[in-house]
Amino acid sequence: MTEYLSLLARVRSRAEQQSADLPPCVSEQDIAQAESALGFSLPPVLSGLYRHVANGGFGPEYLLFPLTGQGRTAVAEYGPLRTTTSEYWPRGVLPILDWGCGMSAAVDCTRPEAPVLLFEPNAVTDNWADAWFQDSPSLTRWLTSWLDGTGWWEEEVMMAEDAQEPLPWPDAAQRLTGSGQSGQR
């Protein structure tokens, strides 16, 4: 628990450095309403960010979506992605950040470690599973890489000679077909 609280404190400190005008945190009731709308629970680290840091507006590059509220929120973004006809977005994978050019960071809320996934649809021609990559094995590690300046999105990391490409998400095909989707484009 101390590690969890320490991470939230570090994130809060960095968020305050990033923006002097962070949105207020959400309440337990806001979390419960969001989870009801989504149809699944948020992992503790993700709900902790929204309850103890801010309702979005912090994080790498383009900043985390607010969980709830007006405009683009994680809950609002997830809704249309998970219509019964969606063939490219698995259930329980919540978009948390828009990288631009159609790319998104998303948290797999069905796993206790809350892996962070990268959805990169631009090069896909036949199979939507090819658009999914594992950005980080856990939200905790993803946040730590942001805090430490070691995330793939950091220019120095991206341009390094030994820069690693994101690895395909090994569960993508099964998660897309496992929810009644074809996985084919």
Image (cartoon, rainbow, N blue to C red):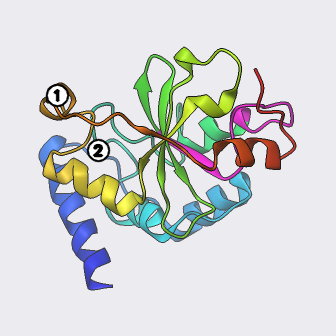
Which residue matches tag 2? 59
Which residue matches tag 1? 155
Displayed quadrant of residue 156 = top left
Position of residue 110 measured from the top left corner of the image (x, y, whole percent): 63, 62
Looking at the picture, tell me which residue is in the foreground, 158 or 27.
Answer: 158
Q: Is residue 48 above or below residue 21?
A: below
If the image is split into quadrants, where does the C terminus sit?
Answer: top right
Dot 1: within a 10 Å radius of its alpha carbon, few (fewer than 14), some, or many (20 or more) residues? few
Magenta stretch: dominant secondary structure:
loop
Displayed quadrant of residue 76 = top right
Position of residue 127 measured from the top left corner of the image (x, y, whole percent): 70, 25
If the image is split into quadrants, where does the N terminus sit?
Answer: bottom left
Please state which amino acid type lies under the numbered disc 1.
Glu
Q: Is residue 144 left or right of residue 100?
A: left
Secondary element at tag 2:
loop
Q: Is residue 32 above or below residue 99?
A: below
Q: Residue at x 15, y 58 (%)?
A: 13
Secondary element at tag 1:
helix
Membership of 91 in magenta stretch: yes
Looking at the picture, tell me which residue is in the foreground, 155 or 76.
Answer: 155
Looking at the picture, tell me which residue is in the foreground, 11 or 137.
Answer: 137
Dot 2: within a 10 Å radius of its alpha carbon, few (fewer than 14), some, or many (20 or more) residues? some
Q: Earlier in the sequence, mark 2 or mark 1?
A: 2
Q: Residue at x 33, y 53 (%)?
A: 142
Task: Give the magenta part as a residue range.
Answer: 80-96
Position of residue 7 measured from the top left corner of the image (x, y, whole percent): 25, 68
Position of residue 17 measured from the top left corner of the image (x, y, whole percent): 12, 47
Q: CA distance from mark 2 to mark 1?
A: 15 Å
Please state which amino acid type lies under the numbered disc 2.
Gly
Q: Nearer the viewer, mark 2 or mark 1?
A: 1
